[in-house]
Image (cartoon, rainbow, N blue to C red):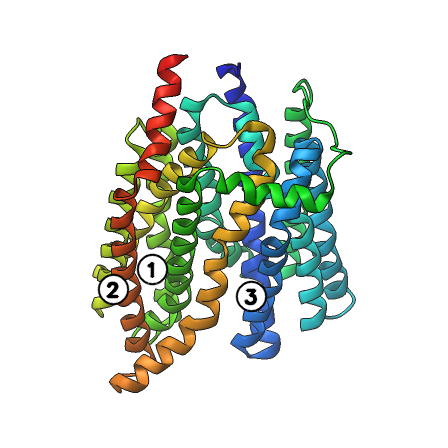
Amino acid sequence: MKQKSRFHKFLLLWSGELVSSVGGGLTSFGLGVYVFRQTGSASGMALVTLFGFLPTLLLSVPAGVLADRFDRRLLMMIGDGCSALGILYILICMMRGSASLAQICAGVFASAVFSALLEPSFRATITDLLDEEEYAKASGLVSLAGSSRYLLSPVIAGLLLSVSDVKLLLVIDIGTFILTVLSAAVVRRGLENRRKAETNESFLQSIRDGWRILRMKNGILTLVAISSGITLFMGIFQILAEPLILSFESARTLGIAETVCAGGMLVSGIFLGIRGLKGRYVRTLGTVLILSGIFMTGFGLFENMILICAFGFLFFATLPYANGCLDYLMRTNIPDEVQGRAWGMIGFLSQLGYVIAYAVSGAAADAAAALSGQGVGRGAAMVIVVSGICLSVTAAMVLIPDSIRKLEIDRTEEETVE
């Protein structure tokens, strides 16, 4: 039985991830500015983003299998430590003169390959450390750490770039990797590792098991599909919010608006970190997703920065609640010994929504602009509005299936028996 006293170990691990997230945000912001200044092209920035995203998507499933076969904390240390090598490569190229777009893409790709080891192991470690009633509180803190790269990093990076250049940001990011590795090492010490490498099962069979685990309960697979839908709408929102605002405001205003909107995640993340969620996870999930769709729709309806920031803030405020409910419902219905491969498969399937968003949102906005004759900004707004409506309709379906409600009912019955 897990002990509540282990929450301090989670906080130490989380602190390392918070610092790492801020450092990653510094590098992302700095490289974006560097590539744009070097190439004068937005497509170069998009290419760097793509190379940073693909390894995480493609390797999440095998990384999950590794998390079940080997020491999860050790995998986190390897993933974080070796991720610094890709950033170090970019730094060396810059110190020798300048880094080409190809060199930056190679470094980002290498860093992302090792970072892919981190996510399944980190999520599975939360299950190793905490009791079930602490999961929601932990999820709120994890959301807070993730949002820090959008809240803190741009402000810090902007200030540092005014007195130095991108190389300083890379050095700081490399330093954060060291702190993250040390925090994982401290948590690993004194925490028993109960899993051994599985020698009687092939790697491919372990991957298949990840899919089989999700199929064991129809409600889990439905929740994963909902997660993929959320990432689809999130991806569309993230891509099209910028051209929407830039169609009638400056880049400086855009930066302020992004910080204000992301503040919604900060507020609700802190609240969840303190209070957590107290039951009724399915109802809460359906409700906050319906609201998030309404807020997304409101974001695209007006050319008024006060209203845009208000709706954006409210939209992002709903996300930690949705993630907390999804996290709890899936985590408590998946056996601990297979959490790694399960989270790897969940990460792969849920992030497919981003791939679709990257592929279709720009073309959809251009098509909407051509049909309406009102410009790309309003075309982007139309796509965001439609996406918000679709999100609300999809969210309403969460409250309908018995398979999803059964996940919470079954868990309540098990706790009553215990």
The first of marks 3 and 2 along the sequence is 3
Residue type (three-letter) at the residue carrying disc 3: Gly
Residue at position x 54%, y 60% in the image: 29
On-image quarter of the C terminus: top left
Find disc 3 in the rendering and name its residue. Answer: 32
How many other residues sit within 10 Å of disc 3, few (<14), some (14-19) or many (≥20)?
some
Residue type (three-letter) at the residue carrying disc 1: Ala
Element on which disc 2 rests:
helix
Find disc 2 in the rendering and name its residue. Answer: 305
Residue at position x 60%, y 28% in the image: 337
- Nearer the observer, 63 or 77: 63
Residue type (three-letter) at the residue carrying disc 2: Met
Answer whether labels 2 and 1 touch (C-beta < 8 Å): yes
- Compared with 342, 87 (above or below) is below
- Nearer the observer, 150 or 385: 385
How many other residues sit within 10 Å of disc 1, few (<14), some (14-19) or many (≥20)?
many
Q: CA distance from mark 1 to mark 3?
A: 18 Å
How many other residues sit within 10 Å of disc 2, few (<14), some (14-19) or many (≥20)?
some
Residue at position x 56%, y 45% in the image: 211
Is residue 130 left or right of 413 when viewed as pictured? right
